Amino acid sequence: MVIKIYFALVTGIASKAMLPRYAAALLDGDLAHAYEIVAEVSDRGDRQLIPGDDSRLLAMSDVLSLLDNDEEAEHSYRRAQKACRNDQQLRVMSCRNAGWQALKRARYGTAHSCFTRMARDDGATREEMIEGSIGMAIVHHLLGQQRSATELVQQAVELAGEADDPLWSQTVALLAADCSVRGEICCSGSLTDHAFWHSGRETGMTSAGAAPPPILPDWAKNDGAQISLIANHFNYLRYLYAVAQGESESVGPLSSIIAQRALWPGRSIPVQAKVDAVLAALSGGFAPAAERILETISKRDIDGVARRWNLDLLYARAKVAAHRGQMQSALQLYTTYSQEALLCLRLETLTLPAQASRTVAGAEVLDDIAARLPAKYRRAYRYMVEHISDYGLSTREVAAHIYVTERSLQMMFKHSLGISPGALIRQLRLQGIHDELQTDVHSAATVLDTAHRWGLNSRSTLVKSYRKQFDESPSETLNG
């Protein structure tokens, strides 16, 4: 899956009202032109920013990330968040920015946590909820969890159906086709040893009922796509699917698409697009074509993408080596693939449900809040987590731990998270209480006993804050 396609689409669609020229360039895949349109904001200092510059800074950050200038992009994201004056908008912006950056780096647990928080924030717009659902669906799909991905795509379909801009519905339709085509290829009978995808398919069926049927693309309905970025990718998926189904006449057109430079943002050919074509050729029984496409992937191409969890590429190399009769090389590659797949399943797939609330003292904090803070202030957050049950925990104590003033701590948390340190401490405590009330470990204890263990003594504060955060009372959680 080419993640840049969806990042460019959601960014472009969301920018149409405020920055129409930038949006048009982005939706055409012309990143250089898009950057030129908003680049002037980088010349203005923080005190020289004018109304609307937070949107321009965010737009510039996005296009820098699409151009793989990640260090500059991160700096611009910080500036955009600092320029945002609305706490609700800032919370969503912070989650959204960190989510796409984590997804690009294949840090799926963190990305999922960010997108979940974004989609469920009370201040999120419908469009931001759609973007959050798209992000979550991509995470689950990349982890091979087709059931969860399908459910989230359906959620995005419903939200997009009520949006003003029809491009949201077209983007979600593209994602649905993408997930279905890749799922069909990677779980095909010809690739039964693609263990990561097949294990993901199994673990994604734990809920009651049979697995949903694949959403196979109805290509005729998508021929009227309004923008070339969507239409071209549908065309690519059409041939990808046809080759995987064994249609030999589609091998040439797919190879030609892979050789072009006008179908993806940046006008370059993403490695994952080539890898998917290799897998499609292997699935359809066209090993020579798979070999030819694989040979076009250079070391420079690979160095330009996330090094974590390049499982499809490792698997494709192992299969091609086996087809060539290079059995020792194939075995070594498949062994590496299997080890990486197992590690990914253990570190990413199995921890997704727990990512948003890992508050066990002493545990390494890897959730979205830590990802959205500068390195120095992550230490402050870790200190909060480790001492969250201490009655006397305060922002002053946390600030002193990392040798900054209380005001500096408050400002950095506001700019990075859209929330004060004190409010975050309260949220963490309430989350701990909520998690404990849902377990049977302390079923004999009262709600107040549980609250006391998490550093909360006021009954009125507990009930009021708890209902606001979870939309139910502590007793309703306990008896649920």
Image (cartoon, helix red, strand yellow):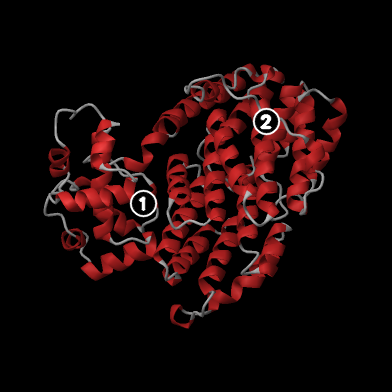
Query: Hey, which quadrant is residue 283 in on the image?
Result: top right
Q: Position of residue 299 (x, y in %)?
A: 62, 42
Identify the secondary structure beneath mark 1: helix
Residue at 58% across / 61% down in the picture?
A: 64
Which disc, if any, is residue 100?
none
Residue drawn at 40 percent across, 35 percent down: 353
Is residue 435 in view from this perspective?
no
x and y percent of residue 302 in the render?
60, 43
Q: Nearer the viewer, residue 426 or 308?
A: 426
Q: Which residue is mark 1?
A: 369
Q: Is residue 180 left or right of residue 354?
A: right
Does residue 261 lie above or below 53 as drawn? above
Q: Quadrant of residue 164?
A: bottom right
Residue 117 in percent (x, y) is at 42, 48
Q: Which residue is at 20% across, 49% downward?
A: 462
Disc 2 residue type (three-letter): Ile
| Residue 210 located left or right of residue 228 | left
| Res. 2 image quadrant | top right
The secondary element bearing badge 2 is classed as loop
- The quadrant of the rendering that contains the C terminus is top left
Q: Is residue 141 visible?
A: yes
Q: Amino acid at mark 1?
A: Ile
Farthest residue toward the right?
Answer: 249
Q: Is residue 182 left or right of residue 105?
A: right
Instruction: Specify which label sits upstream in the sequence, 2 or 1.
Output: 2
Q: Which residue position holds label 2? A: 215
Question: 272 and 217: which one is in front?
Answer: 217
**Mark 1 residue crowding within 10 angstroms, few (<14) / some (14–19) / many (20+):** many
User: Which residue does the image show at 67% across and 26% down from the upper left?
Assistant: 184
User: Mark 2 against mark 1, which lies toward the viewer?
Assistant: 2
- The percent position of residue 367, horizontal first and vertical second, equals 37, 45
